[in-house]
Image: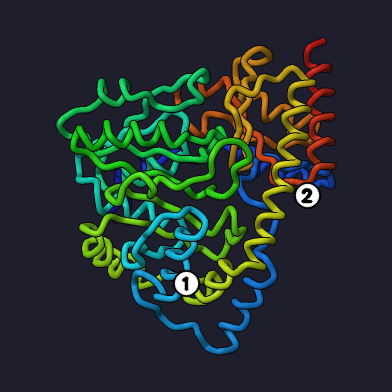
Amino acid sequence: MKKHTLAARVEQISPFQVMAVLARAKALEAQGHPVIHLEVGEPDFSAVNPVEAAGVQAILQHQTGYTAATGLPELKQAISDYYASRYHVKVAPQRIIITPGASGALLLMSSLMVNAGAEVLMPDPCYPCNRHFVMQVGGHPTMLPTMPEQDFSLTEQQVKDAWQDHTAGVWLASPANPTGAVLSKEYLASMWRTVASLGGHLLVDEIYQGLVYEGEDFTALSLSDDLFVINSFSKYFAMTGWRLGWLVVPEWAVEGATKLAQNFFISAPSVSQHAAIRAFQTDALAECEQRRQIFSKRRNVLLAGLKSLGLPVIAPAQGAFYVYVDVSEITDNAMEWCLELLEQEHVALTPGADFGVAKAHHYVRFAYANDEDKIRQALSRIGRFMKVNAA
């Protein structure tokens, strides 16, 4: 009998190292140990009450069938109105493609703009699935090492030096995972001019949009109608399991994106779409803003605690709910450090190797998607861990 083999592309995909941390954390919890989770990139809130109620109402009204492939017209209009009211940017509803989560948008974007053999430039570190989606369409993600002194952002010179005939574009994120860094409007405008002059496309991942504590909360769509933006209901709106996101494309790409969406997804989840319309009403947005303030307070607690422990925060952590920390003074292997911390003090963190290659073993990501008391407890445990292991 012939032995079955997986497609070669499966071998290209790296597993999340944090899965080893999560597996051990679950085992410790099963043994009765209280683990504090600062590794999970998911809000510890559920969707706001009006959105949940709208989802229930959609089910009761049997609004559970397929929608148009690119999304409910009412939802696309609500997102368009949101861009206009909050960011003072006109985005035609037909340019908005509703997707099954931001992951669906990344798959759509890769298939739309990356030919087999083409290259996409992205910063190291960055969200790991970005490079994996490029690989899935036969493209080549090129991670360009970035410096903490430049907030882990690519420079224009790096892009120019790395650009080749087969380079398709540049993918950025703001606020960024894992660093929490927020790109300035001036930076993005300059990068867009550079990429456009080289004949490539620019994608800006804005899935943490709204969760900004320092710097300007804006959208890259204010710079041009000719670039691409991904967004999601998972972070600011805390709708992770509803699996709903969107991709904004230039007018010239609408037909191609529609064709791909029809074939890939049929449609995004209908109940989630009906519920998400409610997310843009004043009371729901006010509750989301209250939660942003809670995240901001948690951030301050974590930053102050890390400073007191002598753990250097090497990116400004202006947005999202992440802090990227340099642990190279106390370990030469962040993954081992994370596992030992979990074992001894039951605090779960994410090792930097999940996000890149360049000096990744120097870094650890903290996620402050947990309440202030738990963050304080975690800091106390980490301090004790560092003291014991320094002896």
Where is 146 relative to 67, above or below? above
Q: x%, y% of residue 142? A: 32, 30
Rendered-image quadrant of the C terminus: top right
x 47%, y 35%: residue: 183
Q: Nearer the viewer, residue 133 or 83?
A: 83
Q: CA distance from mark 2 to mark 1?
A: 34 Å
Q: Amino acid at mark 2?
A: Ala
**Nearer the viewer's eye, disc 2 or disc 1?**
1
Q: x%, y% of residue 112? A: 25, 53
Q: Which mark is residue 30?
A: 2
Question: What residue sits right under mark 1 in the picture?
Answer: 269
x 65%, y 52%: residue: 43
How busy is the neighbourhood of tag 2: few (under 14 within 10 Å), some, or many (20 plus)? Answer: few
| Residue situated furthest bottom in the rendering | 61
Q: Which mark is residue 366?
A: none
Sooner in the amino-acid sequence: mark 2 or mark 1 = 2
Where is 13 relative to 327, above or below? below
Rendered-image quadrant of the N terminus: bottom left
Q: Is residue 16 visible?
A: no
> What kind of element bears circle 2?
helix
Q: Is 125 displayed left or right of 143 in the figure?
A: right
Q: x%, y% of residue 147? A: 47, 19
